[in-house]
Image: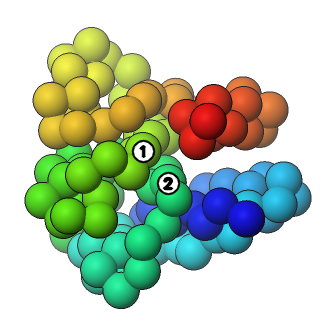
Amino acid sequence: MPSILAVDDSASMRQMVTFTLKGAGFEVAEAKDGQEALALAQQKKYDLVLSDVNMPNMNGIELVKALRQLADYKFVPVLMLTTESTGDMKTQGKQAGATGWIVKPFNPDQLLNTIRRVLG
C-alpha cells in the first residue's frame, strides 16, 4: 500500500485529504508545515508527497527544494495542492522540482486519479 505524506497548515484541509486518501486505501502521514514534513521525510521514505504552497515556517516550494536534496527523494513525486493557480507560482514549483499541481478546492476523484497516475 503506497504511503503519502500530506502537508498543509490547515487542519481541516489535512483531514479532508487524509479522509479521501485513506478511503482509497493509501497509508497517510500528516504534517502541518514544511519543517515538520521534512523531519518526517528524513525518518521514512514516502511514495508521494502532497503539499500546500503557502505555509508558515517552510512553504511548499522550499519543502520541494529541500526534499530534492535528499537521496531518497530525488525521484519521489511531489504534488502541490494549493489555491495558487498563477503561472508564476507554477513555474517556481516546477523549477523547485514539483511533479504536478492541483488547485484547491480539489475534487476527490481528480485528486485520486492524479495520484494513481503519478504513482504509475
Q: Measure the alpha-carbon separation of dots 1 and 2.
A: 5 Å
Say above or below: 103 vs 73: above
Which disc number belongs to residue 5?
none
- Asked if labels 2 and 1 touch by Cβ distance under 8 angstroms, the answer is yes
Image quadrant containing the N terminus: bottom right
Badge 2 crowding class, 10 Å Cα cut-off, few under 14, some 14 to 19, many 20 or more, is many
* Residue at image mark 2: 48
Q: What type is the residue that disc 2 sits on?
A: Leu
Q: Within the image, what quadrant is residue 56 found in?
A: bottom left
Percent from the top left, x then y, of residue 14? 60, 63
* Residue at image mark 1: 77
Percent from the top left, x then y, of residue 70? 18, 65
Q: Is residue 33 visible?
A: yes
Q: Within the image, what quadrant is residue 41 found in?
A: bottom left
Percent from the top left, x then y, of residue 43? 36, 86
Q: Residue farthest to the right?
A: 23
| Mark earlier in primary sequence (1, 2) | 2
Q: What type is the residue that disc 1 sits on?
A: Pro
